[in-house]
Image (cartoon, coloured by chain):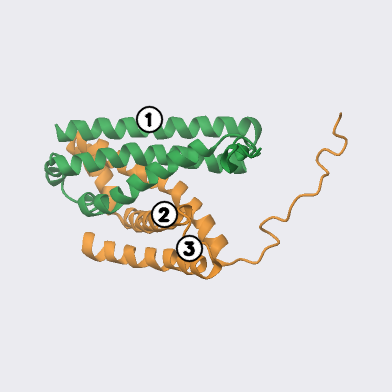
Chain colours: A orange, B green
Amino acid sequence: MADVNRGKRPLSPHISIWRWQINSISSILTRITGNALLISFLLFVWWLLAASTSPEAFDLANGFLTSWFGKLVLVFSALGLWYHFLAGLRHLWWDSGHGLDMKTAELLGWACVIGSVILTALTIVLVWGV
Amino acid sequence: MHFLSARKRAVGLGAARSGTERHWIMTISSVALAVLTPLFVWQVAPLFGASFDTVLTAFSAPFRAVITGLMILLGFHHLAIGARIMLEDYAHGETRKFLIIGMYVICFVAAATGLFALARIAL
């Protein structure tokens, strides 16, 4: 039978209607950081390929990485990587049937946000020695 | 019905009828990446900004080379599937197909390039 009501059916409420809270924010941040890491990974491959090519090619990639913009990209890459890492651990914990009550779930969301900032700060200090 | 287990009765009744396989693959790679990420930050991240010779010597160390190879392989695999799931949510029709194919091309070409570069430095 032809669907006469195509395109006019009511839709379930979407993000515009809900109040933002830590669970929805930490969920969308997981997707944003995961996909944004494509840029970080491509940058890493460029740097590695440059190192395998010639000193001149390496200087170009290294010059970008050590510029203020390159450093900014590195810091945001670390932040994205650590956030996605913690959110992934949270997901594995949830998938095994733990921490699904509201209080624990919200606590884990904040742990991802605050934890990623702490791990990024530790990376800057301990790994990059700034 | 009493002879069927609860699981057997539920199998195949989901709206999509498939898709759990991809979730399982993401679970496997996420466990691997959960181990690899701290190792990568510890072993490879300090080299960003290092001199040409330091970088070449560093990647000839077997442990660091293997960590890097696994990070490239599993990272791009995880990324390709993750990006595909996102595109399936937000893009539609022909656009979706082109974007998913494009994303897979980028991920696999980058992964192969990364492994090639790593092999050239490490060996």
**Where's residue A32, x and y in %?**
49, 52
Which residue is painted at 13% across and 39% down in the image? Answer: B60
Horizontal arrangement in the rendering, residue B123 relative to residue A80 (left or right): left
- Mark 3, Cα crowd under 10 Å, few <14 / some 14-19 / many 20+, is some
Tell me: residue B1, above or below residue A27: above
Which residue is painted at 40% across and 55% down in the image? Answer: A89
Tell me: residue A129, above or below residue B95: below
Q: Mark 1 belongs to which amino acid?
A: Val
Q: Quadrant of the N terminus of chain A?
A: top right
Q: Are marks 1 and 2 in contact (CB under 8 Å)?
A: no
Horizontal arrangement in the rendering, residue B29 relative to residue A109 (left or right): left
Tell me: residue B41, above or below residue A19: above
Image quarter for residue A22? bottom right
Looking at the rendered structure, which numbered label has been put on residue A84?
A: 2
Looking at the rendered structure, which numbered label has been put on residue B50?
A: none
- Mark 2, Cα crowd under 10 Å, few <14 / some 14-19 / many 20+, is many
Counting labels gives: 3
**Where's residue B50, x and y in %?**
18, 50
Residue B115 visible somewhere in the drawing: yes
**Where's residue B102, x and y in %?**
49, 31
Which residue is painted at 27% across and 61% down in the image? Answer: A123
Q: Quadrant of the C terminus of chain A?
A: bottom left
Foreground: disc 1 or disc 2: 2
Foreground: disc 2 or disc 3: 3
Q: Nearer the viewer, residue A93 or B36?
A: A93
Horizontal arrangement in the rendering, residue B106 relative to residue B34 (left or right): right
Q: Chain of mark 2?
A: A
Residue designated by label 3: A99
Q: Are marks 3 and 1 in contact (CB under 8 Å)?
A: no
Asked if badges 3 and 1 are on one and the same chain, I answer no
Residue A128 visible somewhere in the drawing: no
